[in-house]
Image (cartoon, helix red, strand yellow):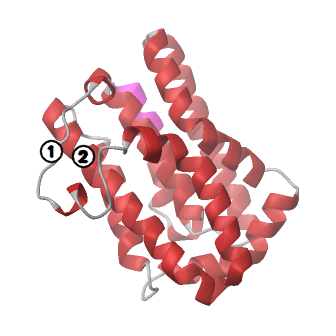
Amino acid sequence: MDEFDACMRKLSSITESDELALASTRHELDILCSKWKMGHRCVDEHMSRCSDRLKQILYNDVVHGTRQVMNELCSPGRMQNDYLRLAPCFKSLFVEGGKCSQKYKNMIQWSKASTDMTEAANVEEGLRRTCCTFNEYVHCYYVHMPELCGEEGRDFFRTYTEKMSGPLIHEHCASYTYDSTCSQGASTAAPGATLTAARGIFGATVAACMVAAALL
């Protein structure tokens, strides 16, 4: 897994830098997009050589929306222009002292921890915690976005977050609800094939979604 771990480090390095993860200028966005493409190309090449067809299909299904969002964001056009106009406002929500800063830190912390989990029980708990922290992060945005960024900011965030994380939230996180399982100390959901099949799929999926989520 050394090669895969190196790929994951390329993706996780984005979230370790506030200047990149919270990109709010065209220069910062260009650097982020370059690192994003390198990291995902690395993961894709590794999985095409080392993963069976089922795992590749599963991974591609989960990150399909994230790829679309990042491809749009990293290409000149309306979405990129809209993002750069709204980015300073988005950033103000989760920089130090921002209303969602702790939710953002929790999300990034668990996305990193989850990539190192190998045992089925640990992966199950890692998925629960990641799903819950991701939900809490999105919920915080929905609550505070309108007052700070207006309706345009809220609509932009809603549209692209749903597109980006739909499969992760509605399929792989479906067993974890915001105010029930997420408030428990341990998951009550039974581990499924998605959890036990491959550490790599889960880790790469989390990394992909978290990188994009950190932007939006």
Residue at image location 51% in from the left, 74% down from the top: 141
Amino acid carrying label 2: it is Gly
Residue 40: image location, x then y, percent:
58, 36
Residue bearing mark 2:
126
Which element carries disc 2, helix, strand or loop?
Answer: helix
**Which residue in the structure is indicated by mark 1?**
188
Looking at the rendering, the stretch of residues picked out in magenta corresponds to: 1-7
Residue drawn 42% across and 78% down?
101
Magenta region includes residue 79? no
Question: In the image, is residue 144 above or below residue 181?
Answer: below
Q: Is residue 55 left or right of residue 181?
A: right
Q: Local crowd at mark 2 within 10 Å, few (<14), some, or many (≥20)?
A: many
From the image, give the main secondary structure of the stretch colored magenta. helix
Rounded to the nearest angstrom, the CA distance separating label 1 from label 2 is: 13 Å
Badge 1 element: loop
Identified by mark 1, the residue type is: Thr
Residue at 41% of width from left, 26% of height from top? 3
Q: Are marks 1 and 2 in contact (CB under 8 Å)?
A: no
Q: In this view, does 14 lie above or below 100?
A: above
Residue for point 62% across, 63% down: 158
Q: Which of 159 and 45 is in front in this view?
A: 159
> In what quadrant of the picture does the N terminus appear?
top left
Mark 1 burial class by Cα count in 10 Å: few <14, some 14-19, many 20+: some
> Which residue is farthest left?
185
